[in-house]
Image: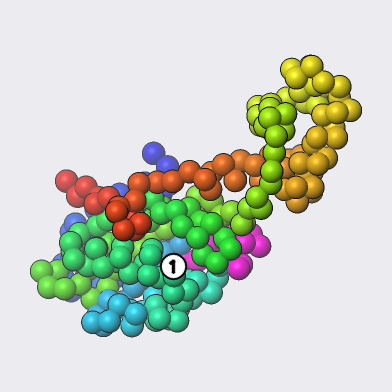
C-alpha cells in the first residue's frame, strides 16, 4: 500500500471517531507531518451558500521542485474559489466538494484535468465535517501523480512510429537500425528530427515527452456531462 492510501486510511479512521465539534486540526494533526513531497493538505470552508465563496486554505503545500508546479501555485492559493482558475474550479473543485458535502462522508478519486497549459493527474481524498447537518468544512488530502506541459502535435510516419516504440523499449540506435533494416545514420537522422518536432533537448527528454503525450491521450471514467465521478471511500 502506498503512502497516499496509508495516510488516507489514517485520516478516515480519525474521522470515524470524530463528532460535529471536532476541528479540522484535530483530524489531520498526526497525518500532516507525514506527508511526502508530492502530497498537499487543504481545508475548504463550505459555510457559504454560494460555492464560489467557499474558502480554500493550504495546510501543507507540495514541496517537490518543479517549474510546472511553480506555475500552478496560483490555482491553489489561500482565497475564495471565485478568485481561482474558473474552468478548473467549475470542473474539478465545486462538483467534488459539493458531492462530499451532500453525502456527508469521505470521497476518494483519481483526477485528471488541465489547469491552463498544464495537464495534471492526482489522487484526492475529501473528508467533510462529520455532522448530521450540512458540513461547514472539508479536509482534502492530495497526492500528485504527474504534471505535464502542453504537448505539441508532431506528425510522424510509420518508420517514426517504429523508431519511437523501439526507443521506449530501451533499444540503442544500432539495435533500432538492425530491427528496422536501416542504417544507424538513418536512425540518428530520424531521432534528430523527432527531437526537433517534440522540442526535446536529448533522447531522455524525447522519450519522456513521447510517454507524456501518450498518457495525456488516455482518459479516466467520466460521467455523461464530462465531469469526474468520485468514488465514495469505504468507511466500513
User: Left of 138 or right of it: where is 78?
Assistant: right
Give the answer, above or below, for where 3 lies relative to 106: above
- x, y percentage for residue 34? 44, 55
Tell which of 130 and 122 is nearer to you.
122
Would you name the residue on which mark 1 appears?
Answer: 88
Asked if 51 appears above or below 95 in the picture, the reply is below
* Circle 1 residues within 10 Å: few <14, some 14–19, many ≥20: some
Residue in the picture at 72% in, 42% down: 206
SS assignment at label 1: helix
Question: Up-down: is 173 above or below 112?
Answer: above
- Residue 67 shown in magenta: yes
Percent coordinates x, y for residue 208 in the rendering? 66, 43
Q: Is residue 33 visible?
A: no
- Camera-nearest residue between 98 and 158: 158
Q: Residue at x 46, y 57 (%)?
A: 113
The segment highlighted magenta reads: 60-71
Amino acid at each position: 500500500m502506498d503512502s497516499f492510501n496509508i495516510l488516507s486510511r489514517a485520516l478516515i479512521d480519525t474521522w470515524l471517531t470524530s463528532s460535529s465539534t471536532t476541528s479540522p486540526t484535530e483530524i489531520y494533526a498526526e497525518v500532516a507531518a507525514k506527508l511526502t513531497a508530492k502530497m498537499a493538505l487543504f481545508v475548504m470552508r463550505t459555510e457559504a451558500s454560494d460555492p464560489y465563496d467557499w474558502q480554500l486554505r493550504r495546510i501543507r503545500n507540495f514541496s517537490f521542485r518543479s517549474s510546472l508546479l511553480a506555475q500552478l501555485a496560483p490555482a491553489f492559493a489561500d482565497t475564495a474559489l471565485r478568485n481561482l482558475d474558473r474552468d478548473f474550479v467549475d470542473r474539478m473543485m465545486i462538483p467534488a466538494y459539493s458531492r462530499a458535502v451532500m453525502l456527508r462522508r469521505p470521497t476518494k478519486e483519481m483526477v485528471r484535468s488541465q489547469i491552463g497549459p498544464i495537464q495534471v493527474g492526482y489522487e484526492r481524498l475529501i473528508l467533510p465535517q462529520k455532522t448530521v447537518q450540512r458540513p461547514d468544512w472539508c479536509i482534502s488530502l492530495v497526492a500528485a501523480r504527474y504534471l505535464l506541459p502542453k504537448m505539441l502535435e508532431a506528425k510522424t510516419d510509420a518508420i517514426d512510429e517504429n523508431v519511437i516504440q523501439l526507443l521506449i523499449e530501451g533499444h540503442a540506435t544500432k539495435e533500432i537500425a538492425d530491427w528496422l533494416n536501416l542504417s544507424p545514420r538513418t536512425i540518428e537522422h530520424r531521432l534528430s528530427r523527432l527531437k526537433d518536432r517534440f522540442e526535446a533537448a536529448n533522447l531522455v527528454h524525447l522519450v519522456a515527452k513521447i510517454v507524456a503525450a501518450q498518457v495525456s491521450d488516455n482518459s479516466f471514467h467520466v460521467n455523461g456531462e464530462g465531469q469526474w465521478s468520485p468514488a465514495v471511500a469505504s468507511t466500513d
